[in-house]
């Protein structure tokens, strides 16, 4: 007579589980050490002339000024040129507006003023 143990839970499975087959993992084998060559390696060195836009930066590095001087030259150089160009353009526009305004005032005073306007226009032209 066989005595079976009572099931603890309704879904207990008394049969052994079948384990899934483990995947084959690739494990590379270490490569052999290459044979040491008897000859020294050949060093091919190309010497080029420095481009003109980098010459100042290379001189700054060679003089011991450091990377900060190079970064400042590279960054602030074009920034300074752009700022000066912008100021020059703004001043040119202001000068053009002043010239056109003076010409317009002289023309209006001449046409409206009569002899007194002619004298005022001459005086204004001498001052301007």
Image (cartoon, helix red, strand yellow):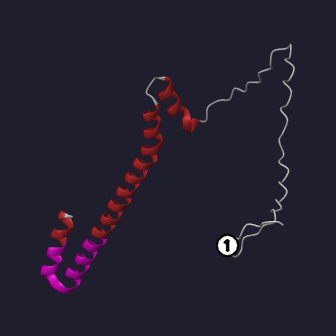
Give the percent coordinates (x, y) of residue 95: 31, 64
Left/right placement of residue 50 relative to residue 105 reads right
Question: What residue is at 65 percent from the left and 29 percent from the top?
Answer: 49
Residue 122 % position (x, y): 18, 71
The residue at 27%/68% (across/down) is 98
24 vs 47, nearest the viewer: 24
Decide which of 4, 45 is in the foreground and name it.
4
- Residue lying farthest top? 38
- Residue 84 at what x, y percent from top left? 38, 51
Quadrant in which the N terminus is drawn: bottom right
Q: Is residue 102 magenta?
A: yes
Furthest residue in direction left, as rendered? 116
Judging depth in this view, the residue of 88 and 69 nearest the camera is 69
Q: Secondary structure at mark 1?
A: loop
Picture quadrant of residue 47: top right
Placement of 88 over or under 29, stated as above or below: below
x and y percentages locating residue 6 in the rendered image:
71, 70
Q: Which residue is mark 1?
A: 9
Image position of 52 (left or right of 89): right
68 vs 123: above or below: above
**The C terminus lies in quadrant:** bottom left
Q: Main secondary structure of the magenta part?
A: helix
- The residue sitting at 25% across, 72% down in the picture is 102
Q: Is residue 16 left or right of residue 118?
A: right
The quadrant holding residue 11 is bottom right
Residue 50, picture quadrant: top right
Q: Which residues are magenta?
A: 100-121
């Amino acid at each position: 007579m066989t005595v079976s143990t009572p099931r603890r839970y309704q879904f207990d499975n008394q049969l052994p589980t079948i384990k899934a087959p483990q995947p084959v993992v690739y494990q590379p084998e270490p490569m052999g050490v290459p044979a040491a060559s008897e000859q020294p390696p050949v060093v091919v060195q190309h010497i080029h002339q420095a481009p003109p836009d980098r010459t100042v930066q290379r001189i700054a590095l060679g003089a011991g000024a450091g990377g900060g001087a190079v970064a400042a030259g590279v960054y602030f150089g074009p920034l300074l040129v752009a700022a000066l160009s912008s100021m020059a353009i703004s001043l040119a526009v202001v000068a053009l507006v002043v010239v056109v305004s003076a010409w317009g005032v002289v023309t209006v005073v001449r046409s409206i003023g009569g002899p007194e306007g002619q004298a005022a226009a001459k005086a204004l032209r001498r001052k301007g």
